[in-house]
Structure formats: structure tokens, C-alpha cells
Image (cartoon, rainbow, N blue to C red):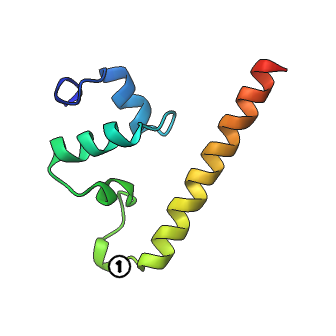
């Protein structure tokens, strides 16, 4: 999959473990290679799509992304302080 997406296996692993997030184009390419809609990649592994309230899912995803961005900003501040 990494080769088809033109990224490294290491980066795939970092995405899978939440260490890094792909750029939007890379995210779309991963979804394309997996033959799924991009939003499917954001649904928790143990959830069934039919069980998920869309609004609740959007709130969870937004919260997770916000936390990751804030953490990354703090890391950048520490790096340049």
C-alpha cells in the first residue's frame, strides 16, 4: 500500500498509530488505494457504521484533530523557545 500511495511504510505505521497525520491529498490517496470513501478511515475500528450518530462522529473527529493540532503547536513552541 505504501508504494501505491508513494509514501514509506514507516509513515503508514505512524499514521496508523496516530503519531502523524497525512496531508489531505495523501489521505485521499490512501482511501483510493483501499477503495473506500475517505470518511470511513476516520471511523473507530470497533464501531459499526450503522451504530454511529453522524453528529457524534463529527464531534469526536473534530475533538481528536483539535487535540492533535494543539499538541503539535505546543511541540513546535517548545522546539523554538
In the rendered image, the quadrant that contains the C terminus is top right
Q: Position of residue 64 (x, y in %)?
A: 57, 54
**How many marks do you count on the picture?**
1
User: Where, by quadrant of the figure, is residue 72 drawn?
Assistant: top right
Q: Nearer the viewer, residue 13 or 27?
A: 27
25 up-or-down from 54: above or below = above
81 up-or-down from 56: above or below = above
User: Where, by quadrant of the figure, is residue 79 drawn?
Assistant: top right
Residue at 33% across / 53% down in the picture? Answer: 41
Residue at 46% across / 70% down in the picture? Answer: 57
Q: Nearer the viewer, residue 45 or 2?
A: 2
40 up-or-down from 29: above or below = below
Q: Position of residue 53 (x, y in %)?
A: 42, 80
Residue at 41% across / 36% down in the picture? Answer: 15
Q: Position of residue 65 (x, y in %)?
A: 56, 51
Q: Position of residue 13 (x, y in %)?
A: 37, 30
Q: Which residue is mark 1?
A: 51
Amino acid at each position: 500500500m505504501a508504494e501505491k500511495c508513494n509514501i514509506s511504510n514507516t509513515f503508514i505505521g505512524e499514521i496508523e498509530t496516530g503519531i502523524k497525520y497525512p496531508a489531505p491529498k495523501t489521505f485521499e490517496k490512501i482511501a483510493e488505494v483501499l477503495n473506500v470513501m475517505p470518511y470511513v478511515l476516520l471511523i473507530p475500528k470497533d464501531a459499526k457504521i450503522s451504530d454511529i450518530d453522524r453528529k457524534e462522529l463529527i464531534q469526536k473527529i473534530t475533538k481528536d484533530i483539535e487535540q492533535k493540532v494543539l499538541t503539535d503547536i505546543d511541540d513546535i513552541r517548545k522546539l523554538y523557545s
